[in-house]
Image (cartoon, rainbow, N blue to C red):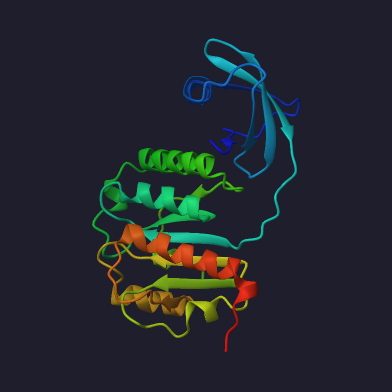
Amino acid sequence: MRQFVLPHQPPDEGLMRLSDNDFHYLATVLRLRREDSFPAIDPDGRHYHCTIEIAGESYLDVRVLPRGEPEQDAPQIILYQGLPKGRKLDEVIRKCTEAGVTAIVPLASEFSVIRVEAMNLDVKLDRWRRVAREAVQQSGSPFPVQIREPVTMDQFSDRVSDNTLRLFLHQEPLEQQTLHRYLAHLPRHIELVVGPEGGLSHRELEILDAKAFRPVYLGSQVLRTETAALYAIAAIRTILMEQTSWMLK
């Protein structure tokens, strides 16, 4: 564990009781004991230094002290992932959380095999958020990842700020610019749409174009939907991380 994700913001007095799954993870899985310390963040992204003061049979009383917040040197990336079959979204959430997304929004696409109305959404959201929390703890990501409720493309906002870049992946070379050129103005907010197994419909492409999303082509190789998002996010993060060492002609 690189860090622990607290279930909620600590109380003002700084002493927090952890029980149930949190107790099991810290005391049984990690075998932490009284006076052991560990780093933590809360659901709002505040960072803490935690020390176990009391180790009971089914709970831990933890002293939680604020620590310095890391500087955010990367853009916020929101992934709209077309709902895939089975538990593929679990893998997308885990890998893309490790890669540094800010939020993941399941996308109810026309070609999605699974339908939102046919799923037990509360149970799904609980599992997806648990997967994201585990990935944040394992990877040490400095910010918690939001798992939002599913949306359709019709629910996307028509208003886009100047520092927001909207992109979507497509299997055909529809791109108007290279990914490097899209990122040249160093956007602070990036929204990325990845379709489900069946891709995006013609109507959905028209919606994306009308809402200022721009196409990205990642080559002729066929990527699974659960691979495509990670591939694109890794490319975006790498290009921006190395921005001082490349130059467009």
Residue furthest to the front in view is 245
* Above/below status of 174 relative to 112: below
Q: Is residue 162 visible?
A: no
The x, y position of residue 4, in whole percent, is: 57, 34
Q: Is residue 20 left or right of residue 107?
A: right
Residue that sits furthest to the top in the current view: 57
Q: Is any atom of residue 92 visible in this view?
A: yes
Residue 172 x %, y %: 31, 79
| Residue 140 horizontal side relative to residue 91, left or right | right
Q: Residue at x 31, y 50 (%)?
A: 88
Q: Is residue 56 above or below residue 199?
A: above
Residue displayed at 47% across by 62% down: 234
Query: x%, y% of residue 134?
Result: 47, 39
Q: Nearer the viewer, residue 114 or 226?
A: 226
Point 32% across, 41% down: residue: 120
Question: What residue is at 41 percent from the left and 58 percent from the top?
Answer: 151
